[in-house]
Structures are given as structure tokens and as C-alpha cells.
Image: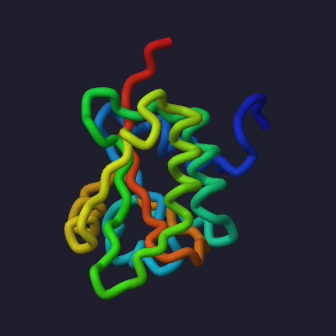
Amino acid sequence: MLKGIPQILSPELLKVLCEMGHSDRLVIADGNFPSETIGKGNRVIRMDGHGTTEILEAILKVFPLDTYTEHPVNLMEVMPEDPAETPIWSIYETVVTKYDTRGKEAMGRIERFAFYEEAKSAYAVIATGEKALYANIMLQKGVVTE
């Protein structure tokens, strides 16, 4: 046990977060995301019993977002034929704003199939049990300055 570390961050996930360097990316995937396919030959961390928002909150407590890129946080863009409602995005905005002074301006969107391609080169994919649609979120690591 460690003090000050959110309990949801497993030893495996903490190790991965520590190993990551500046500009490395991390995907927090919803339950519908093809995590094992996208993460094939890479790191896939299973967190099936948890939702993306609680994982995002815990990670951002210890994970600096990249300040050298306009959008260190990216969401999977909604396909035109799908319902445009993505209520989870407003929760993401609240969480990101809590940990990054740029707030929602730090957040971008990537077209669905481009997101899959970007995710293939991510340092790790966290597979969650999140049921919300379009709840996939990609974080780009920054540097620790303190």
C-alpha cells in the first residue's frame, strides 16, 4: 500500500504510467472498444469492473498532460449516423479542467477510424467495463516539473 495513490491504480497500471515518457499516449477504452485487437503485441491492462471516468480521475492525479501539444486529450469522434449525444464527454471536461488549466481547450476529437490507428501506437490500452457510447479517451503524457 502507498499513501496518496488512488486505490483504483493497480501496481501494473502504476508501473506503466511510470514507464511512459513525454509524448507517449494512453488509451482509456470503453467496453465496446476492440482493446485486445488494437493492443495486440502491446500492453493491455484489464479494468473491466470500472468505468472510464473514475479511471480518468485517478490517472490525472498522478499523470501530467502534455503542454507542448494543443490537444493532449482526445476523444473518439461520433460517426454521423450515430446519436450525437455523448453525456460522458461533459464529465470528462469537468475532470480534465480539474487537472489542467486549459480545461476543455485541452480536448480534441479524432475521427473514429483514425482514433483506432492512433491507438495502435499508444503505449498502453486500458480496457474498462464502461457502457457509455463513445467513451474512449486518449491521453498524451507531459513532463513533471515539480
The percent coordinates of residue 122 (x first, y second) are 31, 54
Q: Residue at x 59, y 77 (%)?
A: 131
Q: How many marks?
A: 0
**Displayed quadrant of residue 140:** top left
Left or right: 29 in relation to 77: right
Q: Residue at x 47, y 27 (%)?
A: 101
The percent coordinates of residue 59 (x first, y second) are 57, 43
Outermost bottom residue: 81
Identify whether 51 is placed above or below 10.
below
- For the rendered model, the colour scheme is rainbow
Image quarter of the N terminus: top right
Outermost front residue: 84
Q: Residue at x 72, y 41 (%)?
A: 6
The front one of 85 and 58 is 85
Identify whether 117 is placed above or below 139.
below
Left or right: 110 in relation to 127: left
Left or right: 103 in relation to 22: right
Identify whether 41 is placed above or below 71.
below
The front one of 15 and 145 is 145
Q: Residue at x 43, y 43 (%)?
A: 104
The percent coordinates of residue 87 (x first, y second) are 55, 67
The percent coordinates of residue 93 (x first, y second) are 51, 48
